[in-house]
Structure formats: C-alpha cells, structure tokens
Image (tube, helix red, strand yellow):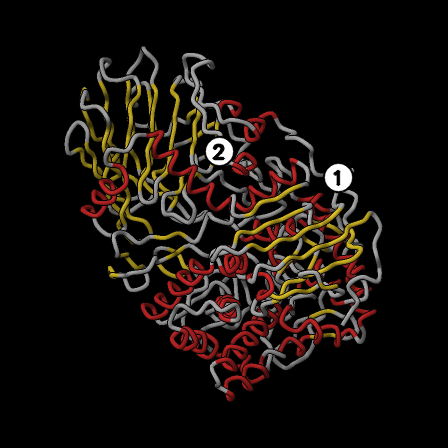
Amino acid sequence: MSLFLSKPVNTTLRLACCAVILFTQAAVGQVKTYEGAGNLKYVDPRIGNVGAILEPTRPTIQLPNQLIRMTPQRADYMDDQISSFPLTVVSHRQGQIFSIKPSTTLPKSGEWGKRLTYDHDLEINRPWYYSNWLVDEEINVEFAPGKKAGFYKFEFPEKGERVILFDRYNGGSNDYKFLSGTEITGVETYNGIKMYMYGEFNTGAATETGVIEEESDGRTRKRVWIRFTINAPKVVEFKYAISYVSPEQAKKNFNKELKGIGFDQLAKQGEEAWSKVINQIQTKGGTEAQKRSFYTALYRSYERMVDITEDGQYYSGYDKKIHKTTRPFYVDDWVWDTYLAHHPLRTILNPDQEADMLNSYVNMYEQSGWVPTFPLIYGDHACMNGFHSTISFLDAYNKGIRNYDVKKAYEGMLKNATHATMLPWKNGPKGLLEDFYYEKGFFPALKIGEKETDPNVHGWEKRQAVAITLGHSYDDWALAQFAKALKKPQDYDRFMLRSNNYKNLWDSNSQMFLPKDKEGNWIKIDPKFDGGMGGRDYYDENNGWTYLWQVQHDVKGLIGLFGSVNSFENKLDQLYREPLGRSKYELWAKFPDFTGITGQFSMGNEPSFHIPYLYNYTSSPWKTQKRIRFLLDTWFKDNVFGIPGDEDGGGMSAFVVFSSMGFYPVTPGTPVYTIGSPVFENVTIDLPGGKQFQLIANNCSVVNKYIQSAKFDGKVLDTPWFTHEQLISGGKLELEMGAKPNKTWGLGK
C-alpha cells in the first residue's frame, strides 16, 4: 500500500481539489469560484505549512517569479490568529513591508498588536487568490496579486466601524501620507533601502484619517488609519503598487497594472499566468495525492528568483544605484540550496529565464565586485558556504544557455575562487585561512575544545572545515570545466588540481571525510555527532554520514577511495540502516536540520538530494528505484506536514519535481540526467520551441516501481542515463515497469 494518500487527510485541505469557494459573511450560498484550469486544481499552497522542526513553507500568493508575494503573518498553519497582511514579502523568509489590517474599531495606543482570529476551514489559498473570514470582526478578506501591484478587498459587517490600519515591519525611516480620502502613499526602509507604495481606495466616503506616533527603540513609529462612514460601500477595496525606485514610479506601476482593472479580472490574469507554467508539464496516472504533491512542488519552484525591473529600470542593492535595462533583473536566490535542482529544472522549463537570472548575477558582480552567494534585494546576504553559482553557470553553459556576458561571468567566478573569503556566512577578501587552503589543499579545523584563532570566523557558524573543503572542490571542478571551454589551459590545470582536494580529508580506516588540524594531523571525532551545533566546526547542518557523499563532481573518484564499487554500494546500504546511536531528541537538540531520517540519511536537507541516485553508479540501479519511491512516499505527503525540512523557496521542491517525473541531475554542470522511478505513467513536458519531451512508464503504479526494460527514441537503453540534448530535442523515454526489480537492467556500458 502506498504511503501517498489517495485523498487529502485533513479537512482544512479538502477545497484544493475542487472549485475554490469564496465565502462571504452573509451565506455560504453567495459564492464565486476560481476553479483553476487543468492541473491547477492539484496545487495546494498549504502543503508543508507546519515545519518538521525549523521553518515551514508559506502559502505564498503571487505570480510566477514576480515581486509581489503575500502570505498572512502567523507562526505557521497551527496558529489560528493572523497578526497582519503584508503588501509584499521582500525576500523569501527574510522580511516583508507595509502592514495592512482591517478592524471594526479604531484601536487605542497599545492595541495595535491585536491579532485576528480565523477559522482554517474558511481560509482559501490559491497561488493567485486568497480569502479568509475573520471570526471576531466578521470581516472577509480577499487578495489578488499582480506583478508590482496587489488588490485587497475587505467586506465589513453592516454594523460597526470600517477601519483600515497601516503599520510597518521594519525600523528606520517610515512614513505614510493620505493624499486624499482615496489615496495613500508610503515609505518603508528595509535593510537600508527605501521602498515606496502608492494606493487607492474605491470610496471617498472617509470619516477621517489619523496618525498615531509612538517612540520605540529611540525611533518614532508612525502608524496611520482611515475610517469610512457607515454609508460607504460595505466592501472596501484597496489597490496598490510597490516600487523600489521612487514614489513616482510606484504610481506609474499602479497605473500600468491596475488602472481600470477589477478584482476578478486581476485574479483571472493571475490564474492564467499560473496555468501557463503549471500545465507546461502534463501527467497521466499516479494517485491524486501524488499529483497534489507534484504540482504543489512545481508551484513552489516559481516562488523565486523574482523580477524587480520597473519600466526598463531597477534599483540595485549592489551599488545602491538605479540602472536602465532591457532585460529582467532578478534577486532573491539561495544558491547553496538552489544549484542542486532548482536552477537545473529551470534550464529545461524556461532556459531564457535562466539566462536572465544568470545575467543578473553578472550585473551584481559588475556592481559589487563579487559574484554573490545569496543575492537579495539589498545585496549579497552572506550565508552558508561555497561559490555554487559557479556550478549553475557551468550547468547552463553546457546546456547551451549563454545569453549573457560569459567572459565577465568567468572573471567573477575566477575572482571568487582566488581572492574571496571561503569562511561561512562571510563576504569580502580572503585571509590567512584561504591562503592555507590554497597551499595545503584542505581547510584546517580546530581540535575539540580549541579556541578560535581567526577573528574573521563567524562565532556561530564556525569553520565548517570539511564541508568547505568538499564544497569548494566541486566549485573548483566547475571553474576548471569553464576554463577548458574558454580555452584557458593554465586555469584548467590549476583548478582541476584543486578539485581533488576532497581526497585530502579522506580517512580510509573509517571510510569518512574527517577534519585535519593545521599540522595535517587527523582530529579524532565522532562523525555522527561531534562538531557543536549542527556539526558546524567540521560539517554544516548535517553530520559526517551526509557529507560522506558530497563529491558529485567525481563520483568515480569517490568510488576509488572506497576501493571498489562493492564497498561503495555496501556503504550506501549502511547509510540507510546505520542507527543514530542516541535518541532523536538528543540528536535534534544538536542537529535540528537533520530531519526526514532514514538511518543516517536526512531527506530534509539539501546535501542529501543526490545520494539515493548514487546506486546508479553501482551494480544495483534497482536500489535507486526502491529508495526514491520510498522517500517520496514517506516524506512528501499532500498535507500540512508534507515537507520533511526547510523547503527553502523551491530548493527542495525542485527535487520532488524531478524525482516524481523519474530522473534527476546528479552532477549539475554535466548535461546528463540519471533515471529513478517515475510515479506517473506518462509525463509530457512542453519545451520552448514547440517540442515535447515524453517519459512513458508502462504499467507504472504504486507497486510497479521497478524498471524492467527501457528504450529511448525506440532504441534499447540499458544504462540509467540520458543527456540534456536528448531531452530538449523532444526525446521519448519509454520504461516497462514491474513489481519486482530487474537486477540486470541498467548495467550496460
């Protein structure tokens, strides 16, 4: 029996598979519907809204890859109260601006923090539409997003006041002004950047407007309100636009998107935008639950990056200037998470957009002097470790995506690899530890209990010495391949040599990657548990068992370290069976990212994504098929608990999209995919240029997960690999599936 659910288990999710009903206070019978075309009915933004331990997903309402993103502000899905509604989420999990909230009374000072109670069963979440019924106030809230604009509707009860409250989320310079009874402007400062809002109400029947100023943290906090007469329309509409350029541009954005546009029309435009991207992949077969998990994961893959261009210009946080442009400029990417599957997925579905995103990276380098790692609106948010954008550049280049300044991109990647700090959660030039790495070929670690000697090391994130050595080995391999393509043989030789640095931390006795001190001596640790919070002295967020496999760029070299394919396969088997050696509560107190546990395997964190596919390098590809189906069925349910770790705005969801379709990019940078076990009988991807890639899995079912035989374009395929060129040429992969493994399939040369 499949662990996927044949139907939603939670009544709070039951509306996702049918027409979306917009409740009003008057009666359930007074409804409108936004059914959604085709596969949109399977998308449920509430999947994963309760985190395993750390961060949940947010039910973001937005257009694909666009600036305006709205999600009600609450702890997670278990919270039955909302503190406010933002006009936009500026960055994935990194803050929002311009708070709005309806009320039936004008709050006194100190009452602005009142939270709004709602009933989960009356909340509607669609990617392009939101509705909620506020129980105590008896107000119905609706929202529809545009690109740089949004539209709220507040339906008030017959009795009581009709008040809209405006607040802010961030400190610094903040200001609201009512230009009239129907117009309002706002400025909010987010991480040093001024952001502008222009909005209009549908009614001029305002009783009054007001300002409440309070001192907080040495600053004046200005909150404003507008109150409408009892004779005003019961439904108060608020349309607005956001600009990162200027207040004048905010109004231009408003006129461009919202002038003469009604709420239903804007919502319909949003539905059409989502229909275009969600229905790009058609599936047949599979359970309803599998489709809900798959198409919701596809929706999340469009949460970011986001396009912040406004009328051929954008504000850059990388040089604090406004730039003219003829191309979209994208921000909000966490490349430590997204290089693995998110960027590779986009190279298939929208290569032109991927080119624009990489072009944005090049622009950021030109403007700031460094290729960023976590590019946000205000600049590079130094986070995690490695220069994995190098891998994304190589992956796109080797797939023919070169519509950006390739030489300038290489210049930036080379500068990162030779002059930038490698320290986690740090930006800036290199120091003594980098010079040590360049000379010795590994990042030096501290002994257990030894005090940090380098003041530049982040006090919480530590050195992460093994993770850095492994991660930069992959980055340097990617840079070497890029150098080879650009006919730079000296750079190629240099960085290919550095790409083997991972071998310097291989301990053949334990068959683990372990830390060394600056003298080159092994530091004796328990790779399951040592290294402080998250193992950050040596690894990062996960333990040595996870980082044992972080050699995607040289799997054959890793197999060589084990001594044989057999030993490699046995260690993979052991990974899924190795006991924790302690209670889960003890483990999670130290490794909260180590979630989605199967033995020592952690499905809930990005470094694990490729590991189940490594059996395709052994004599048992059938074990990849077994593991992938089990992991999908176990950890990615179609309910509020359906994400086993931090989803990271598309990072984990792209793994679900690939794996559910039946293939995966083990080594981004190499234009090759390896085959897993599709959950659908038929997957058809509409490719740019009018071609289609088709994967047919005959007799595929919950039980029939094993590949018996395969053909590609009618020719027998006896290896679990195919190329990107075969895919984008409109190839057809046909699999025969069965209930028991064919242990000889996939062993061809």
Q: Quadrant of the N terminus?
A: top right
Residue at the far left: name it.
Answer: 180
Labelled disc at residue 2: 1
Q: Position of residue 660 (x, y in %)?
A: 65, 49
Q: Amino acid at mark 1?
A: Ser
Q: Residues within 10 Å of mark 2 (few under 14, many from 20)?
A: many
User: Foreground: 437 or 686?
Assistant: 686
Relative to 533, say whether 21 is above or below: above
260 displayed left or right of 647: left
Disc 2 target residue: 36
716 displayed left or right of 348: right
Q: Amino acid at mark 2?
A: Gly
Q: Position of residue 162 (x, y in %)?
A: 28, 19
- How much space separates mark 2 and mark 1, taking CA atoms? 28 Å
Question: Which of the two marks, 2 or 1, is nearer to us in this view?
Answer: 2
366 displayed left or right of 279: left
Q: Position of residue 456 (x, y in %)?
A: 46, 69
What residue is drawn where x is 34% and y is 14%? Answer: 157
- Mark 1 secondary-structure assignment: loop
Q: Position of residue 585 (x, y in %)?
A: 69, 45
User: Foreground: 732 or 344?
Assistant: 732
Task: Tell me which corner region of the image, top left, top right, bottom left or bottom right, holds residue 199.
Answer: top left
User: Foreground: 335 or 213?
Assistant: 335
